[in-house]
Amino acid sequence: MRTRCRYLLMLLVTWLVLAFAAPVTAKVYFQCPGYDPASDSDINGDGLLRADDGEISNPLYSNQVCLHLVAGDGFSTMADVADTSMYIFGFHNVTGLSDDQVMNTWDGGGGVLAANWPAPTLKFKQGDYVYLTLTNVGMMMRPDLFDPHTVHWHGFPNASAIFDGVPDNSISINMGSSLTYFYHAVEAGTFVYHCHVEATEHMQMGMLGNLYVTPSMGANYVYNDADTQFTLRRDYPIQIQAFDPRFHEQHISVQPLPFADMKDTFPMLNGRGYPDTINSGNIANELGYDAQDIPSLIEAVPGDTILIRFSSLSTTSFHTLATTGIPMKVVGKGARVFKGGGVPTGVNIFYQTTSVTLGGGETVDVLVDTTGIPEGTYFLYTTNLNHLSNDTEDYGGMMTEIRVQTGL
């Protein structure tokens, strides 16, 4: 009830600010060359407009891709018994929504208060020409803030620094404005993306997500290397994240933020703690919006080869993820095939392991061959034992399940 009252109060304050503000030139502007909103649409519902899917009438490139993200605030729900509500910043995909609808609230069909946790997963093909428009819809619950936002494609070799998203040498997007980034996805691999404005704060608040590029060799390869083949549709991005509840509580209460004392006690995989990680459905927040829509349950039929794309965007800790009874073969690291020189012709240095360790900003690709593995449920969990909890409640946190079963 308190949050809903605060929500209504913030709406009133925002309306008053807009009503008496001087005219400005900033506006929402989605850019996609050759796109006709009257006839084009996201036919397959993947959140992208792809020329090779017939979703852009007159593209500049046959493999052109367009999408529209918004950056704003919202809420997410933790996996503890109390379903603790957490104030967040985040991204949301509004691809296909008309420009004049973007600044509406989520329940009015727009992108305000529609932050997803984590950010929408972005999947491209090697060679794609990507136009990514980012619109800053502002912080509805914190109208005292005027934070700009960016998209930083971590580890990607941008053609120009202006599209890198690092405020030192690129453009940040102010409230009510849009900027279109341009990328040529020349390299396959597992990446991550996040906002790079006041990075520690914005990442702790939730502005981060999965991103990967499939190789030209085929969607069932990790890289352009025959040794990296896996079973089609058995690929799972797993991102390490965590929240410090005190930091989020101080934020929504407009209090000084405890940067020096930051301590994550809600560890998560893909924005969920166990047992929510194995919940295949969406998780609604306190406003009724499905803010968390990425489960972490891994499923396979005996004989399948699974690809797990591990990444970490933790702002506080290194983490080790381990399996019970299933070996993993490391085939890539840092968006490079794990061979000499990071190229397919290099010396093969793949290795078998039951655990991988990642720091913030790192990615690791592993293959799991289920041939000969008994059917059943196995665990993927952190060996940082204090992170197998949902705040003060044990038997949760950074853990999910790998299910090997006939008929899945």
Image: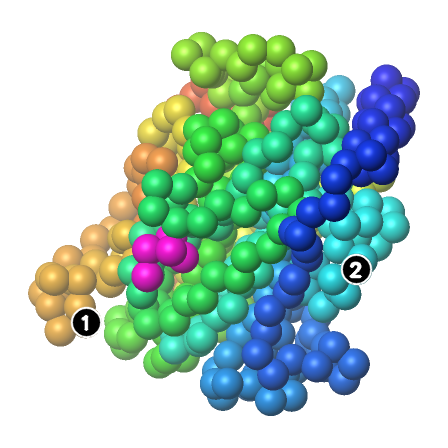
Quadrant in which the N terminus is drawn: top right
In the image: residue 271, left or right of residue 264: right
Q: Secondary structure at mark 1?
A: loop
Three-letter amino acid code at the position of disc 2: Asp
Tell me, yes or no, if residue 1 can be seen here: yes
Separation of marks 2 and 1 at Cα, in angstroms: 48 Å
The residue shown at (74%, 62%) is 99
Q: Between 11 and 378, which is closer to the camera in this rendering? A: 11
User: Which residue in the rendered view is the most extreme toward the front?
Assistant: 22
In the image: residue 178, left or right of residue 105: left
How many marks do you count on the picture? 2
* Residue 193 on the magenta segment: no
Three-letter amino acid code at the position of disc 1: Pro
Quarter residue 72 falls in: top right
Q: Position of residue 363 (x, y in %)?
A: 34, 48
The residue shown at (33%, 55%) is 161
Residue 344: which disc? 1
Quadrant in which the C terminus is drawn: bottom right
How many other residues sit within 10 Å of disc 1, few (<14), some (14-19) or many (≥20)? some
Q: Which residues are magenta?
A: 160-164
Q: Between 18 and 14, which is closer to the camera in this rendering? A: 18
Residue 100: which disc? 2
Q: How is the image coloured?
A: rainbow
